[in-house]
Image: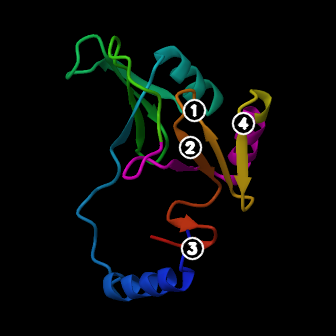
């Protein structure tokens, strides 16, 4: 399959001209409340996110939609949460990257924390990939792809995106 990169760039420029407003209005949203993922093992997930990545567990309670299921949350800074459900007895398949599905979750950390967490991932034997010296990609125990990004919120590789 041949990809017409010139046509893709032209389309990107057309979309940029049409939709990027010179005076962007304020968003109707206040921020990301939580992003919810699935966990096959509550304690394994807590050890990974709290102990390894240093995202404190903030709460755990029964999921209102499925009796016996846990709904639990981690603080990822700036008033944002990463949440999980487990669904005992449903035998859900592991994470799978699909069209229209989740590609990865990028979480901003300061450069010193990025270096420390990179070292912790290496010591724990977590396979990872470093890109552009500011991003580290890896998967959680259930296969969800994560990125720790040493850029400030609202920046991507030195460019303002917000």
Q: Nearer the viewer, residue 123 or 140?
A: 140
Q: CA distance from mark 3 to mark 4?
A: 32 Å
Which residues make up the magenta segment?
A: 97-121
Residue 33 point in image, percent of width and height: 33, 44
Quadrant assignment for the C terminus: bottom left
* Residue 23 showing in the rendered view: no
Disc with the residue nearer the chain's start (1 vs 3): 3
Res 2 label? 3
Q: Residues within 10 Å of mark 4 (few under 14, many from 20)?
A: few
- Quarter of the rendering containing residue 27: bottom left
Tags 3 and 4 touching, CB below 8 Å: no
Q: How is the structure coloured here?
A: rainbow
Q: CA distance from mark 2 to mark 4?
A: 12 Å
Location of mark 4 (residue): 127
Residue 22 left/right relative to 150: left
Disc with the residue nearer the chain's start (1 vs 4): 4
Location of mark 2 (residue): 146
Tags 1 and 3 touching, CB below 8 Å: no
On whether residue 45 falls in the magenta region, the answer is no
Residue 34 point in image, percent of width and height: 36, 41
Location of mark 1 (residue): 140
């Amino acid at each position: 399959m041949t990809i017409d990169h010139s046509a893709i760039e032209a389309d990107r420029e057309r979309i940029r001209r049409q939709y990027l407003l010179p005076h962007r209005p304020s968003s109707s949203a206040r921020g990301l409340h939580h992003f919810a993922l699935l966990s096959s093992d509550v304690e394994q997930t807590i050890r990974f996110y709290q102990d390894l990545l240093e995202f404190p567990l903030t709460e755990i309670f029964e999921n209102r939609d499925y009796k016996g299921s846990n709904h639990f949350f981690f603080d990822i800074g700036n008033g944002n949460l990463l949440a999980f459900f487990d669904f005992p007895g449903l035998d859900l398949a592991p994470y799978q990257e699909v069209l229209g599905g989740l590609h990865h979750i990028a979480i901003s950390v300061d450069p010193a924390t990025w270096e420390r967490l990179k070292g912790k991932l290496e010591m724990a034997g977590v396979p990872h990939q470093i890109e552009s010296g500011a991003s580290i990609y890896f998967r959680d125990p259930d296969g969800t792809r994560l990125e720790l990004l040493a850029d400030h919120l609202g920046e991507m590789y030195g460019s303002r995106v917000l």
